[in-house]
Each structure stands twice: as structure tokens, then as C-alpha cells.
Image (cartoon, rainbow, N blue to C red):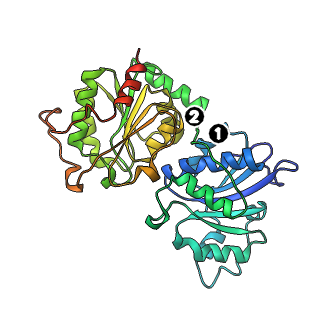
Amino acid sequence: MERAGCNRDGGREGGRRLGFLHQGALGDFVLFVPILDALYGQRGVECFDLWTRPGYRALLEGKPYAVQIHGLEAPFWDALYRDDAWEEVPIPEDLLRPEAFFWVGQPGARPWVQRLGERLPIPVHWVQSFPAKEDGKGPVTRFVADQLGSLGWPVDPDPPQVVPLGSARETVERWLVARGLGPGGYGLVHVGSGGRAKVWPLARWQRLLRYMDETLPVPLVFLTGPADDAYVPFVDHMARRFGGHRVSGWDLDQVAALLSLAGFFVGCDSGVSHLAAAVGTCSLVIFGPTDPRVWAPRGPNVHVFQDHWTPEEVLNWDLRDPGAAIHTVSDVCHRFFQCMVGAFH
């Protein structure tokens, strides 16, 4: 993604330019986006070079600053990990443009950050991507911002904001119309997560879905991703039971658009839940082993419910009766259900 002001000659005239390496999961990156927003709005950084996953470019469309996305395929990055090559491999031109470079990762990356700092003629900093247990219970974005402040780049970030691509919205709207749905006229459900331990037991999902159907019978769209194969039989059964649709394999820009057009969203601690919050959809996010004080999605329409379960419970569900699970969900989040009902009246 190359825009005016982020060209190969160094960006806008007089503008500041920073480089970041961030290879974290989707939720980590969504929580990182406010850092870029604040650096632009509060520190005058007009151009960013990002070494990150290519799919994340969709999350930065519509931003007022300029961005270039880079991969880690260049020989330089492979050589950086090799004792016999890192000192001699040529430096890519892209790494010489920013006025400073920040490697956002966990402590295991520090040796490579040190090597990078010895090779580049600009300041190179390591920023821990999320707090360890001994670092306290503050939100991830605040944790990263505090580190930047200690490095001379103080910022006060707002909650994440993502604006889906117009072309993606058009594609999703056509998909909805073909199924008799419209913007705001459905709820989106994602039962999975990148880690199975974070997935609410499927039996409890059964009970919640039944309660939702009884409280406000609206069409549901179920989302599944690459990490959700184990839950697909359950999701397909629930989609048939409640007259819903399942989508899978969509690009990130289309997922963002689908979330933004939904009347509400329900999910576990996952990257999709962070994206739902970032596009502004009224969301219920169910937490278990992870700490919502650190990892909860940020936004005015986010409602968090924390529950407790064992890993052995996750995949158990009753094929015969979707309401058979003994678990109180009518009180999961009263404010969320008020929000959900309000979206359809």
C-alpha cells in the first residue's frame, strides 16, 4: 500500500517517518493500531514502514497517514538470525528510510534487535508487545504506549478504530442481499479462537444461542476461520437449528465489513472480537483463562463476560437438544442484550 507522502524517496516533505516490525496475531495488531494513530496525531509522524503480515494492510485503509507494508522475505532477515552472515549481508534500502525503528515482540527477540541496532544507522528499539504476569494488569495498548514514552515518543492512544474498505462493504452487502439479509439485520457469532483454551464450552454456546433466539429471534451469521476446524460440525448444526448462515475463508477486509454491518457480535477472546470492537459493533466478548483487564477489546460498545471452565469441557455439546446445557446465560450481560434489542427496534 503506497500513497502520496510515503514514497520511496522518504515520504512527505518535512514529515516524520518511523519503522515498526510487528508479526503478532490479529488481536495484537488491532490493539497496536491506536499507537500508529497517536503517533500521527500527537507526534507528527506522517509515514510508517511496517514489517507485518500482508493481510493487516486492510486495517489501515482510510487512515490519514501514509503506510508501506513490507515482508520479511529479503535475505537480510534470514541472515540476521545466522551467526556467520548477519554482519555482512547488505541492508535493504527500505530499512534506511525511517528516522527510528521499533521491533515489537517478546523478550526472545532481543538478541536479533541488538544485531539490527548494530547494523542500522538509526536508533533501533525493542518494545515488548504485551505484558508478562509481573508487568501488571493494564491494557496492552497502554503497556506499549508507556514503553514508547520511555523511549522519547510519548503518546496517549484512543481505542482502536478500523474503517472497512468500501469495496469490501459492497461485496458483503451483495452477499447479504442474496440471502435476504441487510445491513444491521443480523447478528454475527464467532465461537472459536486462536487457542482452544479460550473457547467457551460449546454446550454453553448452545444455551446462549437458544436464549438469544427466544429473546430476539433475528438471523445469525456464523463465522469460522483457519483455527476453527474442530468447531465446524457444531457451528453447522447451530446454523441449521437457528436458520443461520456460515461464512469461512473470507479475506480480512471482508470480515471487517461483515462485522461493521452486523447488528451485534458475540465471540470469545479472539482477534475477530478485537476487530468487531474496532469497527464499532455492539459486542459481547466471553473471557475465560485470559485476563480482560489486559486483553479485553477496547471500545464504547464492548461488553465483557468472564466465565470459568476446564479445557475438557470445550468440545462437549448435546446434539439432541441445543438447550440442554445447564448454565445460566440470561444474566451474561444485561447491558449487552439491551444493546442487542435496541439494534433491532
Tag 1 and tag 2, C-beta contact below 8 Å: yes
Q: Type of residue at label 2?
A: Pro
Residue type indicated by callout 1: Glu
**Where does the image place residue 247, in percent across and percent down from the top left?**
38, 35
Q: Is residue 232 visible?
A: yes
Of residue 147 and residue 65, the one placed in the foreground of this image is 147
- The answer to whether 306 appears left or right of 120 in the picture is left
Q: Quadrant of residue 178?
A: top left
Q: Which residue is mark 2?
A: 164
The quarter of the displayed image where residue 187 is located: top left
Image point 63% across, 72% down: which residue? Answer: 113
Residue 149 drawn at (x, y percent) = 68, 59
Q: CA distance from mark 1 to mark 2?
A: 7 Å
On screen, residue 111 versus residue 308, left or right, reads right
Which disc is residue 120 wearing?
none
Secondary structure under the numbered disc 1 in the rendered image: loop
Q: Mark 1 or mark 2: which comes first in sequence?
A: 1
Residue at point 74%, 69% (across, down): 123
Q: In this image, 309 relative to 167: left or right?
A: left
Image location of residue 107, percent across then percent down: 53, 71
- Crowd class of label 2 (few under 14; some 14 to 19; many from 20; radius 10 Å): many
Mark 1 Cα shell of 10 Å, populated few (<14), some (14-19), many (≥20):
some
The residue that label 1 is drawn on is 61
User: Front-most of 99 and 167?
Assistant: 99
Q: Check the image and report above or below for 111 versus 248.
A: below
